[in-house]
Image (spheres, rainbow, N blue to C red):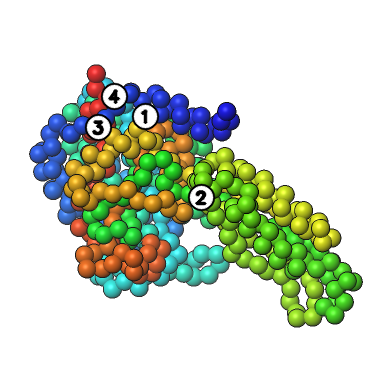
Amino acid sequence: MNNNPIKKTLLALAVSLSPAFALVPAAHAADLDKQLKQTEAKVIEWRRHLHQNPELGNREFETAKYITEHLKALGMEVETGIAHTGVVALLKGGKPGPTVALRADMDALPVTEQVDIPFASKAKTEYNGEEVGVMHACGHDTHVAMLMGAAQVLADMRDELAGNVLFIFQPAEEGAPDGEEGGAELMLKEGLFKKYKPDVAFGQHVTSSLPVGVIGYRSGPLMASSDEFRINVKGRQTHGSRPWGGVDPITAAAQIVMGTQTLVSRQIDITKEPAVVSYGVIDGGVRNNIIPDSVYLNGTIRNFDMDNRQEIFKRLKVTAEKIAESSGAEAEVEILEGYPVTVNNPELTEAAIPVLKAAAGDDKVMVIPKITGAEDFSFFANEVPGFYYFLGVTPKGTDPATAASNHSPRFYVDESALAIGTKAITQLALDYFDSQKN
């Protein structure tokens, strides 16, 4: 029996979809293409403005104003200040039907841009007590621009829509500042889905790992959960020449690092889903001949199964505590739960494939491997059936394997991909409406 409440919810939602559910071609494909063509230049203009004016998570004040002005000009009901700086707009269709949520993230990163383009970011701000450059090094500027384009097209078609569209412009996808809440989780906590009650949610993300215009997707688990752990190993200080005179937290910490590697290799069923336990920080001691009182360990857990996730939490704690105890030390283990697994609803994924092919071309849509990075779209997809996919932005002639990756100061977007992304996210909403007509 599966006692995972999230999985139960997803299963129930999947069953609730009609067995005959399948996305169908939009009724007015020619008109749609014409409207999308008319927005293409504007999407690029919006993207360049956003790229030149990036803001960090929970601080996207000007970004939110820019989006809000656009949505209000389209005659939508706009709500601001959600999860600090989030913007939400509801487009009411002319006919009754479901509500489709379309999401774009807004925040930039503390990265100093090194790309030679006319609209490169020169922005600077304070982050963790020091001045840093700010850059849309993950492509969230493109996500916002493409969703603004979709809003433009769908608003022009509102009388024909058999349902409503909920546009979600989400702050702090890269994480809220220390001591703050943010992102998709906070939007839900503040009642976003309880108020608007979307039936499904769609999202997209640009990536340098795919050639320009290629769309990558995967059914089921797509992106890993991401959780942080902190271990404080307490010993008792002594002189390095007399280790028996105290308790050495350094050797205990070293044993904990090695011992916890067996969590995945020996204690978790990796035929079910893969997992990773990695350490990023080992900090302890100030002098070569002094054994310190304590050592601090800090790391990350990545995993693709919510049951395995809880099992790793439990076993990490027990393993660290018992190893420390065996040497006379003590281990205090803290686990900070981050983003859950991003799961694409299988039925929604299968139905979306022909839509993606219509947007990008039959030969430009492919299944991609699991991604050990994380995404807080996962919170939305835990509430309603969700579908999330990737859009390649690496220019022709550049090998995606060697292209500067997302989060790099040299991350570069081939803007010809934006028309494809705008069409895909727009068409997913339209065809979902068509598929739900009686």
**How crowded is the residue under tag 2: few (<14 C-alpha within 10 Å), some, or many (20+)?**
some
Q: Give the image quarter of residue 23.
A: top left
Indicate left or right for 48 with 133 as reference: left
Q: Which residue is mark 2?
A: 274
The C terminus sits in image quarter: top left
* Residue in view at x 55 percent, y 64 percent: 128
- Residue 145 screen position, x and y as percent: 28, 51
Q: Which residue is mark 3?
A: 23
* Residue in view at x 43 percent, y 38 percent: 381
Q: CA distance from mark 3 to mark 4?
A: 10 Å
Q: CA distance from mark 2 to mark 4?
A: 32 Å
Q: Earlier in the sequence, mark 2 or mark 4?
A: 4
Q: CA distance from mark 4 to mark 1?
A: 16 Å
Indicate left or right for 29 with 393 as reference: left
Give the answer, above or below, for where 254 lies relative to 386.
below
* Residues under numbered marks 3 and 1 in contact, where contact means CB atoms less than 8 Å apart: no
Q: Which residue is mark 4?
A: 20
The amino acid sitting under disc 2 is: Pro
Furthest residue toward right: 245
* Residues under numbered marks 1 and 2 in contact, where contact means CB atoms less than 8 Å apart: no
**How crowded is the residue under tag 4: few (<14 C-alpha within 10 Å), some, or many (20+)?**
few
Q: Which residue is mark 1?
A: 199
Q: CA distance from mark 3 to mark 1?
A: 15 Å
Q: Earlier in the sequence, mark 3 or mark 1?
A: 3
Q: 126 or 247, which is in the foreground?
A: 247
Residue 62 seen in render:
yes
Q: Give the image quarter of residue 241.
A: bottom right
The amino acid sitting under disc 4 is: Ala
